[in-house]
Amino acid sequence: MPGMHIGIIGTGWTGCHRALELAKANYQVTLFEKGDEIMSGVSGDNGIRLHRGPHYPRSKNTRENAQACFSRFRNLYPDLISDHEEAIYAHGVSDALGQPSRLSIAAFRLVCHETVQCQEVDPRALGLKEVSAAFKLDEPSVAIGSKLRVAFAERLVSSSVEIYLGCEVTSTVLENARIALRTATGASFWFDKVVNATGFQSMIPRAFEENLPLHAEVYYQVNLVLHYVDRHPSGKPISRIVMDGWFPCLMPLVTDDERPQTKYVVTHGSHTIKASCRRQEAAQEQLESLTDKLVESTMKIPADKEMIRFWSAFGDRFEYVGWKGVSQAKLKTRSEFRGSLTFEHGGVIYVFPGKISNVFDAEDETKSLLASIRCTERNGIRYALSEVLTKASRELQERPRASEANTSDLRVRL
């Protein structure tokens, strides 16, 4: 209820957006960040798009949610949106394993045209090869880096949100209907409720392995992004994404108001996913084992070849400059569903991350839990009866079949 004191652990998109919206609703909010600056993890370092939906062609719920939140996000954060000169989705003929696209061209065409602004374009005019069709969409990037951090720092200060940087939270304890939040230095802070917005990376109870809503299954994926500089940039940024299977993806990194845009990243389903692990600790070990030499020989070289296979101009136009890796929590589903889940246990509200636009779903569900409106409890876990959760229930419970390729089972072979 308004007036409650809420502690939020983590200052990525989930934590910072939640803090601002709760402050608007007259909650007293305090943020905790173990790093030296806000937005210092995935939210602030990886290339982020404001999805329209075609990146998730087999998950209807993910696409519908992306469309529903698109305008809401764009209207609230217009200063952090960077429109593309071209945002292209192409239907690949065969992927890196020689398999055909998992979706027929007819089905993928229908998926792309769910976006009203979608235009089918000639792949040859774009220099694309080995694709059966290409579609241009209004799918912008979202700022990262210094531009994002400055914008949110100003918003948080103006909203009177208290922030503790360099403050690692190590535990939360429920005592007398309040939550004691303990830090690595031994300090304690007391709150009416706490929100764990660490991306499901820290202080996650083991009980969740058996009792997540709708029996959702979690895994931790080690994902790499390969960084490039565009030697021959045009005006606005571009993106090139081939679907649906083990195909390459080129996206811009918008860190400032630079024009023309020169920073880009490449990802590839079968070349830049290092491992998929049951536990976060195992994923972190895999991430820490990577070296520049290993990444360049086993991931960068084959990813480059794949980009050039579909777009010959890539080799001369883009120069490799390095890589970054992250461990991300994901839900294991047959459709590759990408949405958020929000639930409460022991006075702590946990947020399982999805796409960037899911910050609105998590916000709405958090407010329901705080106000005890349309909530239910199962096996000691409390969650909001949201439309998003209801619609996604079937996808969340359907696991990949043994014969099907799925990113939850994929790892780079070294």
Image (tube, rainbow, N blue to C red):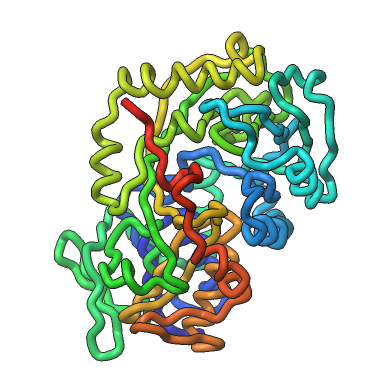
The answer to whether residue 258 is left or right of residue 176 is: right
Residue reaching furthest to the top = 316
Asked whether residue 45 appears in the rendered view, the answer is yes
The answer to whether residue 135 is left or right of residue 32 is: right
Q: From this view, report whether residue 231 is shown above or below residue 286.
A: above
Q: From this view, report whether residue 277 is shown above or below residue 337.
A: above
Residue 69: give x, y in percent of width and height: 68, 60
Residue 175: give x, y in percent of width and height: 23, 86
Asked whether residue 72 appears in the rendered view, the answer is no
Q: Residue at x 38, y 18 (%)?
A: 296
Residue 178: give x, y in percent of width and height: 30, 85
> Could you tell me which quadrant the C terminus lies in?
top left
Q: From this view, report whether residue 232 is shown above or below residue 59.
A: above
Q: Residue at x 36, y 23 (%)?
A: 295
Of residues 220 and 98, which is closer to you in this image? Answer: 98
Q: Residue at x 62, y 57 (%)?
A: 62
Residue 272: give x, y in percent of width and height: 44, 31
Of residues 349 and 150, which is closer to you in this image? Answer: 349
Residue 190 image-quadrant placement: bottom left
Q: Residue at x 48, y 86 (%)?
A: 376
Residue reaching furthest to the left = 186
The answer to whether residue 136 is left or right of residue 379 is: right
Q: From this view, report whether residue 58 is shown above or below residue 174.
A: above
Number of numbered labels in the structure image? 0
Residue reaching furthest to the bottom = 176
